[in-house]
Image (cartoon, coloured by chain):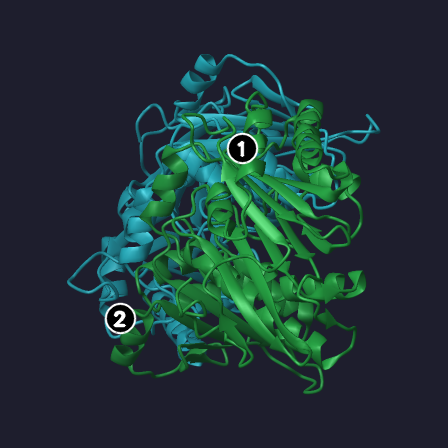
Chain colours: A cyan, B green
């Protein structure tokens, strides 16, 4: 990983965090293999293993009403906080596949457990790809055996490649985090480009550390950091059937992150920055995205600011304007109006890249040339202010989002994904 | 108007309705003019007048929280059921324009009233075009005078042209409706192609009849028919700031449509078919749309079927698949799952063009070739069945929607609309 992993003004590198290039934390190995799911010998299976038998894990899953088989198996058939291996495939989501799908997900889990001499409940399963097609299982045994044989502490790049679908680039990092008690490594591999509007969980992201965390700490930190990263992004407003994030802590560094300690805060900051940057990378890779936006909405209730921010981030009119570098704020006003029916006349303020364009619901004079220059950047920030009657009740939220361009149409109209 | 106005299997011509070619009902005149709003002498102003001083009207407006000035003026400053003229412009929405916008809308209303020797409250104002730009008023006086001078019973085509923006084709009809008491004419002119997800009202549509209706009848019929037509369509899920539908009844035919009569039913059927076909035409003209869809959702509550139908109709993944003639039903399942979080495992059924593809949440075997042929048509029907526990509580709804193709991106990324 190059020195500029934190290549966005919206994800700051904490001072105690440095890029560690690549490689997994102590106690982890990973590999990739071909299991016949994509066919033609393509790499389509990733395996990640934590060698510490007392590893601590935490996980978040999609809350879609149509849950993929691997999500059901992870949710119902893994040991709480006791996951220490992940077997993941691309090329098939194993969703809307019924009982046969559950059996295929269990087969992935059981073959992996047997090969690793682990309990099935210690193995998480994840899938990504087309929905509604049966998962080919004939090549699983051989593919998993190949992956086990190839397991390596430097296998994070291969593992990441194995879980990519329409992703145009890899999304991973290996960070070194200086804590008071010592330095730990924190790594993650993510995938995602389309069908992205995570809620309560996200696409696929696997996070590892050699720090030792209590189960409660792992749950707390993952939960908070997912809420501030993957839960705040949208490519196309579409919640997936397969979103999964799993954090596994090997403890192999000997550094313990105690609950409510300074180190918990520092570790949390590093995890937060890592997941936030990965989330931004997913938005940037939003199936042909050229420009990304961040909308910040301030208002009198949490529910109202959330509704407005999502309405703006998911408006195809806002997204095509972003794509075309058109600072067309009338479409922002329209999206807010749609989100808040019956509230007219609405005294809203809008600024684009810090340039006020609308105040109290009305256009204000602005420097059109400066606005056009600002709108041609690669990261565009929109601020929306809604009326606040009680200054002690102020709420703010953000959503990071992709634009909508021709490539999104090409990818999604011309290929079955 | 050609003989095939009802050119969709989703809008049936009632047996007592025939196409009347073009021309307004008795008692109406219309015209178009250039008022300097689009510039370069382009036609941008439409005027519609009912000569009957006792005309009866009904109207529906957008419920956006950001209401355009003409909508505010219509809502607050016209005579209830007493509108008998409409002045409408394209090229500028006069929305998010504050006090100056209200004054511009009032100027349109007052200049028109004066030129027609009518009360200002009898004149409705409508605008469509870019949001947030001041409405140029310098050419209004001359433009309205030109329109008044050109008023003609055959001016419906010119009027319709004057209100078009990104519309690729005109949407109008002049129908003859045989009632027991005599034959009346029913005509309408609509516009709309983008920023279309009307709720409680619609884009611009002006409807005229020479039948005589009570105010209550006009309100009732317009309300019901709008709910069954414009309220059931989506191009891009975007509620406009300017949606307006106005029905004006001149009574000039001498045929009275009495409340709760057989003729009310027949007139209502004709109005219903007319607005439904116009709604379908708007979807078909959905900014580059090639194929349109109709989703029918059946389930155990009105709220649930509505949520699922909108989720499917507004999914960019479903819409790009429709564009690409790809019967990718996994994306339908995903959209339903997103609409019903926490309901897994969900026993949903999906059929495309009558071919069952998913039953009880699981893929079923189907004829792939037949499905591909069906998916390549111009009107694709999707049926979604959700679990129903109490057979006496069955709800069904529909949404008609455009696909999402390259031309939508081109239109909306490359031009400020």
Q: Is residue A56 above or below residue B177?
A: above
Q: Nearer the viewer, residue B386 or A361?
A: A361
Residue at label 1?
B146
Residue at label 2?
A141
Q: Is residue B208 above or below residue B411?
A: below
**Label 1 crowd bin: few (<14), some (14–19), many (20+), radius 10 Å:** some
Q: Is residue A415 left or right of residue B223?
A: left
Residue B219's disc is: none
User: Where residue B411 sits: x, y (%)?
Assistant: 38, 40
Mark closer to the observer (1, 2): 1
Q: Is residue B77 above or below residue A192?
A: above
User: Where residue A130 sits: x, y (%)?
Assistant: 35, 63
User: Where residue A96 sits: x, y (%)?
Assistant: 44, 72
Label 1, label 2: how many angstroms apart (C-alpha)?
Answer: 81 Å
Q: In the current view of this chain or complex, which residue is farthest to the bottom?
A: B391
Q: Nearer the viewer, residue B147 or B220?
A: B147
């Amino acid at each position: 990983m190059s020195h500029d992993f934190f290549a966005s003004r919206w994800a700051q590198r904490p001072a105690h965090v440095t890029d560690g290039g690549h490689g997994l934390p102590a106690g982890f190995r990973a590999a990739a293999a071909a299991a016949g799911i994509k066919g033609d010998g393509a790499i389509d299976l990733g395996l990640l293993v934590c060698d510490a038998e007392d590893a601590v894990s935490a996980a978040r899953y999609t809350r879609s009403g149509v849950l993929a088989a691997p999500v059901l198996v992870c949710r119902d058939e893994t040991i709480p906080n006791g996951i220490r291996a992940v077997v993941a495939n691309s090329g098939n989501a194993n969703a809307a596949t019924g009982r046969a799908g559950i059996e295929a997900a269990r087969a992935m889990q059981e073959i992996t457990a047997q090969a690793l001499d682990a309990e099935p409940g210690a193995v998480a399963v994840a899938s990504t790809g087309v929905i509604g097609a049966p998962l080919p299982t004939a090549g699983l045994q051989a593919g998993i055996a190949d992956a086990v044989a190839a397991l390596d502490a430097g296998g994070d790049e291969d593992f990441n490649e194995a879980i990519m679908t329409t992703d145009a680039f890899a999304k991973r990092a290996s960070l070194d985090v200086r804590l008071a008690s010592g330095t730990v490594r924190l790594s993650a591999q993510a995938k995602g480009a389309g069908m992205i509007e995570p809620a309560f969980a996200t696409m696929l992201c696997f996070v590892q550390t050699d720090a030792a965390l209590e189960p409660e700490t792992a749950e707390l930190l993952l939960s908070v950091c997912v809420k501030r990263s993957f839960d705040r992004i949208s490519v196309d407003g579409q919640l997936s059937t397969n979103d999964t994030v799993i954090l596994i802590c090997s403890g192999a560094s000997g550094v313990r992150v105690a609950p409510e300690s300074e180190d918990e805060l520092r570790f949390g900051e590093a995890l937060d920055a890592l997941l936030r940057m990965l989330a931004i990378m997913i938005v940037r890779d939003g199936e042909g995205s050229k420009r990304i936006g961040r909308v910040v909405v301030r208002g009198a209730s949490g529910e109202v600011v959330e509704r407005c921010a999502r309405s703006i981030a998911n408006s195809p009119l806002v997204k095509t304007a972003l794509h075309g570098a058109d600072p067309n704020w009338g479409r922002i006003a329209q999206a807010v109006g749609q989100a808040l029916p019956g509230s007219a006349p609405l005294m809203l303020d809008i600024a684009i890249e810090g340039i006020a364009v609308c105040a109290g619901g009305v256009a204000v004079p602005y420097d059109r040339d400066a606005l056009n220059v600002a709108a041609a950047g690669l990261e565009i920030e929109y601020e929306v202010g809604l009326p606040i009657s009680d200054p002690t009740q102020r709420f703010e939220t953000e959503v990071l989002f992709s634009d909508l361009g021709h490539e999104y149409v090409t990818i999604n109209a011309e290929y079955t994904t």
